[in-house]
Image (cartoon, helix red, strand yellow):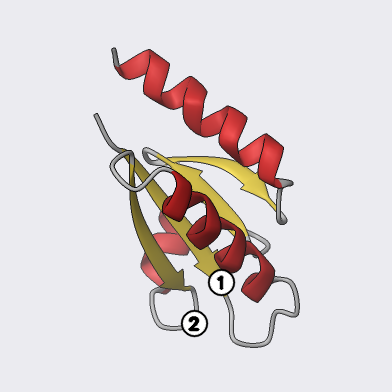
Amino acid sequence: MVVKVEVFTSPSCPYCPMAVELVEEVKKEMPDDLEVEKIDIMSDREKAVEYNLMAVPAIALNGVVKFVGAPTKEELVEALKAELSEQK
């Protein structure tokens, strides 16, 4: 099974590049388990409204916002493993 990871960013956000970098780093370690989509809320406002996002960066796993702000690598990996185990 695959976890869909959506990373919501904004061009003016100083923390967003770190969140994207973190997700890409974890994807390299779990290449078969993640499908990553980066979403710029300035160009895709509908998606941000759909998720009721008020701040970025935000990370959604399988359609549920799990993090607002950049998590630590450990927090992200733990959440991804939990999602994967729920799918089994």
Q: 71 or 10, which lies in front? A: 71
| Residue that carries the numbered disc 1 in the rendered image | 9
| Residue that carries the numbered disc 2 in the rendered image | 42
Return the mark for residue 84.
none
Quarter occupied by residue 67: top right
Residue 7 x, y percent position in the rendering: 49, 60
Name the residue located 38 percent from the left edge and 41 percent from the top edge. Answer: 63
- The furthest residue to the bottom: 12
- Distance from disc 1 to disc 2, alpha carbons, whole Å, reads 8 Å
Name the residue located 61 percent from the left edge and 40 percent from the top edge. Answer: 76
Residue 44 x, y percent position in the rendering: 38, 74
Residue 16 lies, with reference to residue 82, above or below; the image says below
Q: State left or right for residue 21 relative to residue 60.
A: right
Please rate how many residues cluster around mark 2, counting C-alpha atoms within 10 Å: few if below 14, some from 14 to 19, many from 20: few
- The furthest residue to the left: 1
In primary-sequence order, the first of circles 1 and 2 is 1
Name the residue located 75 percent from the left edge and 80 percent from the top edge. Answer: 14
Q: Amino acid at mark 2?
A: Met
